[in-house]
Amino acid sequence: MRMANSAFLQITFLLILFSNFFHTHSQQFSRRLSKNELGLKHEKLSHLHFYFHDIVGGRQPTAVRVAEAAVTNSSATGFGLVVMIDDPLTLGPNLSSKIVGRAQGIYGSADLTNLGLLMVLNFAFTEGKFNGSTLSVLGRNAVFSAVRELPIVGGSGVFRFAKGYAEARTHELNMKTGDAIVEYNVYVFHY
Ligand SMILES: *[C@@H]1O[C@H](CO)[C@@H](O)[C@H](O)[C@H]1NC(C)=O
Ligand SMILES: *[C@@H]1O[C@H](CO)[C@@H](O)[C@H](O)[C@H]1NC(C)=O
Ligand SMILES: *[C@@H]1O[C@H](CO)[C@@H](O)[C@H](O)[C@H]1NC(C)=O
């Protein structure tokens, strides 16, 4: 009788201990975990190459002006101008080549004296193993410089924990329409 009682008490004690353990666990605000627990193995370095089509003119623009400074012509750089984009990204420079994703976000004129854009956008990929994954860009784009470097500040999907940079080079600028084709080389660390 005594033995049965103490065994019962022990089991009860263990049950309370474990329920308490799971209970606190579910209410925990933060904890340490190993990379393995998230399935993170080796950090990889990837190079992506594609062309960005900024289509501002024609019947189907992919870049539209959404705001500008109330004082028009206040600066030669169009300071304050904000453009929302959903620009196609293609494998080759021709717009009819394979689409690998889209550049979705905003660029704005953020420099009063020298043309410099603030770019805040996501590359949303639709091709191969990158389909559904994104890279987030936050950087300065001095569009008339030969090479511009934009930081990659993060990503999603296969690009979780991403960090890196993108190099942008103007491939073609149509002075009549304002349409631009920009070559991108992206170097990114991810798991
Ligand atoms: C706007 O600025 C440009 C370049 O500084 C100048 O050529 C043009 O005359 C200005 N337009 C107006 C309406 O002030
Ligand atoms: C782009 O591709 C289309 C269709 O393949 C072709 O007609 C056009 O000439 C190409 N444009 C350039 C600039 O190569
Ligand atoms: C990308 O993923 C979407 C949604 O899962 C799917 O509909 C589409 O067919 C995929 N595209 C490619 C090229 O795998």
Image (cartoon, grey):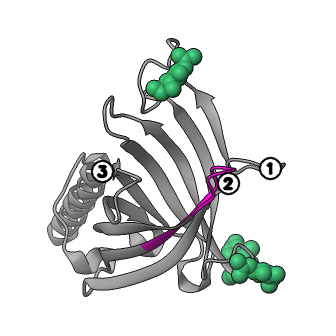
Residue 80 can be seen in this image: no
Residue 156 pos. (x, y %): 44, 64
Task: Give the residue displayed 38% in from the left and 42% down from the top.
Answer: 118
- Judging by the rendered image, the residue that carries numbered circle 2 is 55
User: Looking at the image, can residue 175 be seen?
Assistant: yes
- The range drawn in magenta is 173-184
Q: Residues within 10 Å of mark 1 (few under 14, many from 20)?
A: few
| Relative image position of residue 28 (x, y in whole percent) | 25, 48
Asked if the residue under mark 1 is in contact with the one under mark 2, i.e. CB atoms within 8 Å, the reply is yes
Q: Nearer the viewer, residue 159 or 169?
A: 169
Provide residue 34's location: percent of width, then percent of height: 19, 74
- Relative image position of residue 10 (x, y in whole percent): 18, 65
Q: Magenta stretch containing residue 176, yes or no?
A: yes
Q: Residue furthest right?
A: 59
| Ligand 2's quadrant | bottom right
Sequence order check, earlier mark of 3 and 2 = 3
Q: Rounded to the nearest whole Å, what is the CA distance between mark 3 and mark 1?
A: 60 Å
Q: The disc labelled 1 sits on which kind of residue?
A: Gly
Please name the residue shown 44% across and 76% down the image.
158
Q: Nearer the viewer, residue 118 or 163?
A: 118
The image's mark for residue 23 is 3
Mark 3: which secondary structure? helix
Mark 1: which secondary structure?
loop
Q: Determine contact: label 3, label 1, CB under 8 Å.
A: no
How many neighbours does mark 3 have within 10 angstroms: few (below 14), some (14-19), or many (20 or more)?
A: few
Task: Give the residue type that dot 3 points to.
Answer: His
Above or below, 23 relative to 99: above
Mark 3 sits near ligand 3, with its Cβ under 8 Å away: no
Circle 2 packing at 10 Å, graded few (<14), some (14-19), many (20+), is many
Query: Disc 1 marks which residue?
Result: 58
**Residue farthest to the top?**
71
